[in-house]
């Protein structure tokens, strides 16, 4: 009898406590998140949150390093841009260098073929096996310090109790607090801009917009580098755009259809995408009407992991209107926004996004560019790409983002072969002349 | 935990690889990370397709031969040990290694082993001889369609003539070694970066004289 009596008042107390805490929680939610979002005002809480998180991450990494040193082995430091130093020399220069170093005398008359020539190709080949510029762009960027997310840790071993506790606390906060909060916010329905702003708050996205005077105007095309579907949310919360893209099935499709109701977007059926003329015509029709919103295009064609900018498809640059380049750079310490579509589906990706610490990124609006006289679409595209890469601090690559899924074309190999042959045959002509 | 954590290298394995290949601890972990990122099937081995997925290797005219060098005779998969063993050929010879225990087996990055690696790029059928056909094959791979058969043939003949000493119209490994001297050029690129060797052959002075 005794114990049962004891439980009752305790239960009541617990219920009351829970009730109070829920009410408090909801009120806080309302006041601090939804209301400011509607009016576009910020309390600066998120920036404080960011600063605190950074301090914690540094401490966590420091602990791991110390733990590793105690165990007396070197920590694997993934953050380095290259493991080999490559000098930018041409094929001919390098092969001549090999020959010159190998021989003990001057080579005025270069001989046509040396057995040592294969070493140039051999060295290039092994270099690319150890580290190449392309394949690492299609997987998530590696971080210098650990941000308490297991998914970005390569050294996770039990270092200390304190660290584990901190990690455990992090899990509880992220999955028990941040995730439900964001799920709820994500599903709310609002007017276009308000909706996006709430999404931005929902993801705890801390976005810094630079140079807003260059924001895209009606009748233009906005091009940006592509890392994840969140790019769209980020840009759209600061201005209205018309989207272009394929109609997807599933969750994306539903979102796309609902967006069409608010603004005139340009969605294509999968079959229409193949017809480039149709696509170009619809785009140019939209652009000529200066009352219509600027078109938002991601010319890379696929998601890249935000360390580089890959080849821009020339289609959007052929249309001939003003191009407004935008550079988007995420801070990977707070949560990697890169969507590896061959590895995760959309829902999985959203889950990961909503359970990371925050999305921190910078958006730069670059001054508008137009195609110059005598410049063709490809050159124009490279110029825009170079500007975006420079601003965002990304590597400017010539490789096609399509290499994520497809094979490289043979024409590149043929180019190398042609270069080498010119070297051999060219020397033959010189010799016959002398 | 992600799949990376479950396939972390064990300490004993790292020690064994260190002893066999001479790479440092951090170099081995770096290369292991590279190995796992290439291994799309996540079964701990690399196939030829995994290598060919590297665009810069796919456009290398000798790409297929280099990939072949990683796979032992008749096999289609290479594990991390085999991967490291092949890459070890490209480590430079450090001075303190020269005076090591003479009874120990020859290190993978010794001069002879480096030359053997290069020799085997030419010698596809592994009969320890580079025949005229094998030389032509490699030449053809390097120049593509840009040089005619006759021209290529004369280049091959000239090269064999210079190197061949016992008159069997092919180049054996001993002749290959004697064709020239070895020089090393290594590129230091700082901590955590790997060091590459640059293997060279030089042609004997009288070979050059006779061809001009």
Image: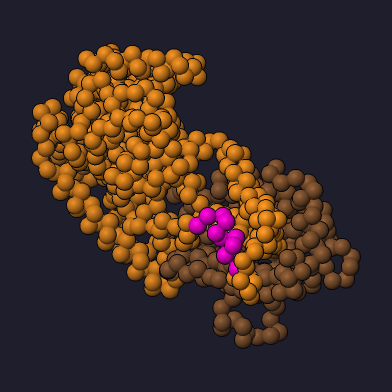
* Residue projecting furthest to the front: A434
Magenta-colored stretch includes residue A90: yes
Residue A318 appears in the picture as rendered: yes
Q: Quadrant of the C terminus of chain B?
A: bottom right
Q: Which residues are magenta?
A: A89-100
The secondary structure making up most of the magenta span is: helix
Who is closer to the viewer here, B193 or A275?
A275
Figure colour scheme: by chain
Give how far across and how far down residue A275 sits, in percent.
49, 17
Q: In the image, is A167 to the left or to the right of B184? A: left
Q: In this structure image, what is the colour of chain A?
A: orange
Which chain is displayed in brown in the rendered image?
B
- Please tell me whether residue A332 is drawn above or below residue B103 in the rendered image: above
Give how far across and how far down residue B97 sits, in percent.
59, 81
Who is closer to the viewer here, A92 or A127?
A92
Residue A139 appears in the picture as rendered: no
- Please tell me whether residue B170 is drawn above or below residue B184 in the rendered image: above
Who is closer to the viewer here, A80 or A426?
A426
Q: Picture quarter containing residue A301?
A: top left
Residue at horizontal 29 percent and vertical 39 percent from the top? A327
Give how far across and how far down residue A260 sits, in percent.
30, 15
Residue at horizontal 72 percent and vertical 69 percent from the top? B208
């Amino acid at each position: 009898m005794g114990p049962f009596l004891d439980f009752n008042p305790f239960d009541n107390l617990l219920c009351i406590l829970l009730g109070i805490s829920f009410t408090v929680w909801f009120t806080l939610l309302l006041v601090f998140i939804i209301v400011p979002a509607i009016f576009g005002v910020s309390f600066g809480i998120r920036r404080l949150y960011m600063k605190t998180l950074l301090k914690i991450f540094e401490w966590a990494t420091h602990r791991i390093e110390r733990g590793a040193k105690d165990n007396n082995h070197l920590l694997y430091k993934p953050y380095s841009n290259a493991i080999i130093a490559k000098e930018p020399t041409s094929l001919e220069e390098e092969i001549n260098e090999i020959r010159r170093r190998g021989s003990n005398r001057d080579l005025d008359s270069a001989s046509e073929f040396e057995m040592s020539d294969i070493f140039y190709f051999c060295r290039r080949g092994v270099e690319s096996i150890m580290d190449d510029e392309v394949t690492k762009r299609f997987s998530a960027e590696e971080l210098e310090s650990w941000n308490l997310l297991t998914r970005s840790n390569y050294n996770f071993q039990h270092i200390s109790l304190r660290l584990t506790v901190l990690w455990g606390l992090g899990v509880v906060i992220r999955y028990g607090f941040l995730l439900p909060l964001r799920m709820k916010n994500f599903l709310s329905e609002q007017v276009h801009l308000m909706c996006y702003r709430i999404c931005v708050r929902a993801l705890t996205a801390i976005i810094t917009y630079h140079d807003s005077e260059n924001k895209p105007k009606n009748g233009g095309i906005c091009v940006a580098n592509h890392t994840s579907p969140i790019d769209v949310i980020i840009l759209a919360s600061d201005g209205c755009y018309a989207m272009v893209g394929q109609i997807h099935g599933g969750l994306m499709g539903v979102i796309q259809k609902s967006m069409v109701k608010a603004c005139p977007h340009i969605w294509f059926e999968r079959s229409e995408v193949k017809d480039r003329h149709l696509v170009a015509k619809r785009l140019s029709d939209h652009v000529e009407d200066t009352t219509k919103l600027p078109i938002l295009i991601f010319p890379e064609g696929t998601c890249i992991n935000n360390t580089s900018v890959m080849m821009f498809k020339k289609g959007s640059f052929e249309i001939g209107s003003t191009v407004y380049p935008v550079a988007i750079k995420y801070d990977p310490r707070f949560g990697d926004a890169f969507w590896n579509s061959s590895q995760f589906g959309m829902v999985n990706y959203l889950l990961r996004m909503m359970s990371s610490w925050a999305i921190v990124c910078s958006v730069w609006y670059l001054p508008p560019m137009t195609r110059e006289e005598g410049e063709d679409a490809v050159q124009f595209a490279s110029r825009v790409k170079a500007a975006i890469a420079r601003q965002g601090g990304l590597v400017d690559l010539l490789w096609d983002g399509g290499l994520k899924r497809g094979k490289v074309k043979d024409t590149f190999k043929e180019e190398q072969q042609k270069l080498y042959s010119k070297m051999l045959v060219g020397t033959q002509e010189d010799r016959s002349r002398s | 935990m992600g799949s990376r954590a479950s396939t972390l290298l064990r300490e004993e394995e790292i020690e064994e690889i260190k002893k066999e290949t001479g790479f440092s601890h951090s170099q081995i972990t770096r290369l292991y990370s590279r190995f796992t990122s290439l291994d799309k099937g996540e079964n701990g081995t690399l196939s030829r397709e995994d290598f060919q997925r590297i665009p810069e290797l796919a456009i290398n005219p000798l790409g297929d031969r280099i990939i072949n060098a990683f796979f032992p005779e008749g096999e289609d998969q290479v594990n991390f040990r085999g991967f490291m063993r092949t890459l070890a050929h490209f480590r430079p010879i450090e001075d303190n290694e020269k005076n090591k225990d003479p009874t120990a087996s020859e290190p993978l990055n010794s001069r002879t082993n480096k030359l053997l690696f290069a020799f085997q790029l030419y010698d596809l059928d592994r009969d320890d001889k580079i025949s005229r056909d094998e030389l032509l094959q490699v030449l053809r791979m390097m120049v593509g369609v840009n040089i005619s058969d006759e021209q290529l043939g004369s280049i091959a003949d000239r090269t064999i003539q210079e190197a061949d000493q016992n008159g069997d119209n092919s180049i054996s490994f001993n002749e290959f070694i004697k064709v020239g001297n070895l020089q090393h050029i290594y590129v230091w690129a700082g901590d955590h970066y790997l060091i590459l060797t640059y293997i060279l052959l030089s042609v004997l002075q009288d070979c050059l004289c006779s061809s001009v």
